[in-house]
Image: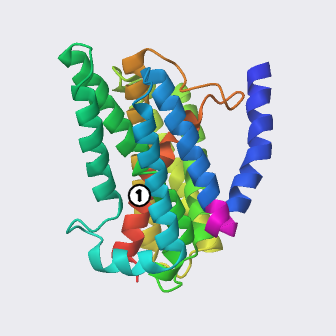
Amino acid sequence: MSRNLMTRIAVAAVAIPIILWVCYQGGWWLYGMVLLFALVGFSEFVINEGHRWYSSVSLVSLISVFFIFSVSSLSGRYVQLLESNFWGNGHYPAFPLIILFFGISAMLFSIGTEPPPVLFKKHSRLVWGVIYIGLLYPYVFLLGDRIGPMTSGFVDGGDCLLFLFGLLWVGDTAAMGFGSWLGKHKLAPAVSPNKTVEGFIGGVAGALVIGLIMYFWKFQQLAFYHIIILSVGCSVFGQLGDLVESMWKRSLGIKDSSAIIPGHGGVLDRFDSLLFAAPFMFMYLISFVE
């Protein structure tokens, strides 16, 4: 067994129980963990993109997004907000903040001294990073902390996160196994040459196994077809979310977002799938589960 693999296993053995414990605590514990993931992930993004002083504007925007989510959600006001205005009308609390960030940052970049094509490219990538991290990470908190009240206690937030983390972790392992064993057809050769269609299907199969286990263990109150849709949907969104991060890293010519997690790379490397799977699961549950 290689030293790197031993490190990966040791870190996972320590981190996984802590993460799951926090997921079941909910509230400020969960909020703090997700905010930490977001801040570290955003730092990785900013450092790799080479941004300097103007990153402070986006950092303030990112913290403000989480503050809005935490205060409104933990006080219970966010439940009514989502129930009445979830699909639009400009009331989603992060949207005005993102628009404000876009306007301020665009004006700051417009008086820069670099050539306009460079300024536009840097601004576009910075806005992309804020939306990518600032809008998607809060759904992990909402899924764990607010999904219970929003479904009248029909599902538990801690169970949802256990389901999601287990599905993504096992699915990722299954995708690697199936890909190395049967992989012949490239899934996205330009973005991630090692990923295959067979591995993608294997990842979905692994997610379905976790879904089946969770159905009989925690989610028998849900119709079985909900579990199938959630398992397949979260796996698909998670695996494609992993490709999104790979696309970003390949555009910069880097292998890992950082080396902050021994043996695993950076926060964005470890939780890229979560950024797309959590919003899908949250939206599905509040839209179709009553």
Q: Is residue 277 left or right of residue 32?
A: left
Which is more toward the observer, 136 or 117?
117
| Identity of the residue drawn at 40% across and 63% down | 229
Residue 225 in the image: x percent, y percent? 41, 71
Colour scheme of the picture: rainbow
Residue 202 in the image: x percent, y percent? 49, 41
Displayed quadrant of residue 198: top left
Q: Is residue 129 above or below residue 255?
A: below
Range shown magenta: 23-30
Which is more toward the observer, 68 or 109?
109
Residue corresponding to mark 1: 279
Q: Residues within 10 Å of mark 1 (few under 14, many from 20)?
A: many
Residue type at mark 1: give it: Pro
Q: Is residue 240 visible?
A: no
Residue 205 in the image: x percent, y percent? 50, 49
Q: Is residue 96 visible?
A: yes
Quadrant where the C terminus is found in the figure: bottom left
Identify the secondary structure beneath mark 1: helix
Residue 72 in the image: x percent, y percent? 47, 72
| Identity of the residue drawn at 44% across and 79% down | 77
